[in-house]
Image: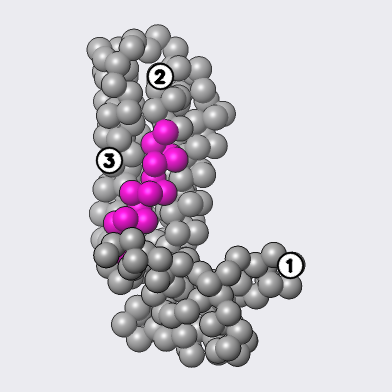
Amino acid sequence: MKTALAHAFQPRKTPIQKRSTVTVEAIAEATIQVLLAVGSDRLTTTRVAERAGVSVGTLYQYYPNKQSLLHAVLEAHLTRVAEAVEGACRAYRGAAVKELMAAVVPAYVDAKLERADVSTALYAAGSDVDGAAIVRRISKSGNRALTAALAEAAGAQPGDMEFVALMIYSAMAGATRAVLEAGAPARMVARLREELLVLCQAYAAKSVRSS
């Protein structure tokens, strides 16, 4: 049942030509704009098509329904976050744990806060498209990268780095979501950056040494 539901949310086709890619990008941005303007309950394919400047027929070539639009923008958002974590892990592979965390934590937070309003709106819209399943699927790549980087960190002992990475990723996700849903005021964002880093550095250092 879940597989069939997820399949129903998938885009109808993937753009190949440059013109098609531009159209899909315009539809994605329009989806975000409509979501921010009226919320997921009032988001419709007609409203998105009008905002994107395309016909509803053109939109339906790529997205069969409202849920597929939300699925696509949520997936793209989470992919950018995971890629930010992967990039930090690649850049600091073999570094000390403290340095690794000093790269990974800001990379994650910056990716989520780049468009804080979008991140917050997508939390609310996620329930319409089984967002938890999308999070689990896409977060795996970030978790794998972090697991490998922790295992290769300077002074790391053999152990269950997959679990350590899961705890760190979960801490980043939970703390950042809490701040975003609180409105992301500047003072809270500043404390998030500082205190989340302290938390992750301390936990990672302890776990990597004692694993």
Query: Mark 1 or mark 2, which has the lower sequence index?
Result: 1
Identify the residue shown where x is 74% and y is 67%: 18
Question: As rendered, which of 165 and 69 lies closer to the eye?
Answer: 69
Q: In this view, does 83 lie above or below 38?
A: above
> Which portion, as a residue range, is magenta?
130-144
Q: Distance between the residues labelled 1 and 3?
A: 40 Å
Q: Mark 3 points at which residue?
A: 171
Identify the residue shown where x is 69% and y is 72%: 20
Mark on residue 78? none
**What SS does tag 3 mark?**
helix
Q: How far apart are marks 1 and 2 (CA)?
A: 41 Å
Question: As rendered, which of 67 and 153 lies closer to the eye?
Answer: 67
Which quarter of the rendered picture does the N terminus lie within?
Answer: bottom left
* Pair 1/3: label in front: 1
Q: Mark 2 points at which residue?
A: 151
**Prevailing SS of the magenta stretch:** helix
Residue 143 pos. (x, y %): 39, 36
Q: Name the residue under label 1.
A: 17
